Image (cartoon, grey):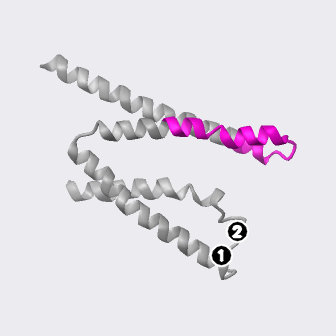
C-alpha cells in the first residue's frame, strides 16, 4: 500500500513538473521572441518566425495544464473551475474598462495595449484560485 501511494505521488510530481517545465519554456521563448521583435534590424521572415514561435510551447503548456487539471480530484477541479469562472469576468471587466478609458482619451494605447495588459490575465487566474481555495479551507 505504501509503494502504491508513493508511486501515485511520484506520478503526480512528474506530471506537475512537465507542466511547469512547459510553462518555463514558453516564457523563455516568449522573452527571446520579444527581444528579437524589439530590434529594428530584425528581418520580416524572422519577425514572422518570432511571432509564431511562442505559440508552440504555449500550446504544449495548455495541453499539459488541461491534462493536469483532468487528473486532479473533484475538489481540486472544482477550485480551478471556480477560479476560471471568477477570473474570466474580472478580465472582461478590466479589458472593457481599459478600452473605454482609452476611447475617452485618458489612457495611452502605447502603455496599455494588448501586448502590455495580457500579463494581468494569468494574475487574475492565480488570485481567483487563492480566493476559491479560501472557500474550501
Q: Nearer the viewer, residue 15 or 133?
A: 15
Above or below residue 107? Residue 35 is: above
| Residue beneath disc 1 | 102
Distance of label 1 from label 2 (alpha carbons): 7 Å
Identity of the residue furthest to the top in this view: 3
| Residue beneath disc 2 | 109
Q: Position of residue 37 (x, y in %)?
A: 76, 45
Q: Residue at x 22, y 47 (%)?
A: 75
Mark 1 Cα-neighbour bin, 10 Å: few <14, some 14–19, many ≥20: some
Q: Quadrant of residue 6?
A: top left
For mark 1, give the secondary structure: helix
Q: Residue at x 18, y 24 (%)?
A: 5
Q: Nearer the viewer, residue 87 or 3?
A: 87
Look at the image and say whether residue 55 sits in the magenta stretch. Answer: yes
Q: Residue at x 71, y 40 (%)?
A: 50
Q: Quadrant of residue 95?
A: bottom right
Q: Position of residue 137 (x, y in %)?
A: 20, 54
Residue 23 visible to the viewer: no
Left or right: 66 in relation to 8: right
Q: Which residues are magenta?
A: 34-60
Amino acid at each position: 500500500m505504501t509503494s502504491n501511494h508513493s508511486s501515485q505521488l511520484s506520478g503526480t510530481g512528474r506530471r506537475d513538473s512537465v507542466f511547469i517545465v512547459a510553462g518555463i519554456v514558453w516564457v523563455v521563448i516568449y522573452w527571446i521572441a520579444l527581444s528579437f521583435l524589439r530590434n529594428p534590424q530584425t528581418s520580416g521572415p524572422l519577425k514572422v518566425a518570432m511571432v509564431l514561435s511562442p505559440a508552440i510551447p504555449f500550446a504544449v503548456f495548455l495541453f499539459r495544464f488541461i491534462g493536469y487539471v483532468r487528473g486532479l480530484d473533484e475538489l481540486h477541479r472544482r477550485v480551478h473551475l471556480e477560479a476560471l469562472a471568477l477570473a474570466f469576468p474580472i478580465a472582461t471587466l478590466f479589458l472593457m474598462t481599459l478600452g473605454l478609458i482609452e476611447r475617452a482619451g485618458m489612457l495611452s494605447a502605447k502603455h496599455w495595449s494588448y501586448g502590455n495588459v495580457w500579463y494581468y490575465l494569468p494574475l487574475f487566474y492565480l488570485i481567483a484560485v487563492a480566493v476559491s481555495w479560501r472557500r474550501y479551507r
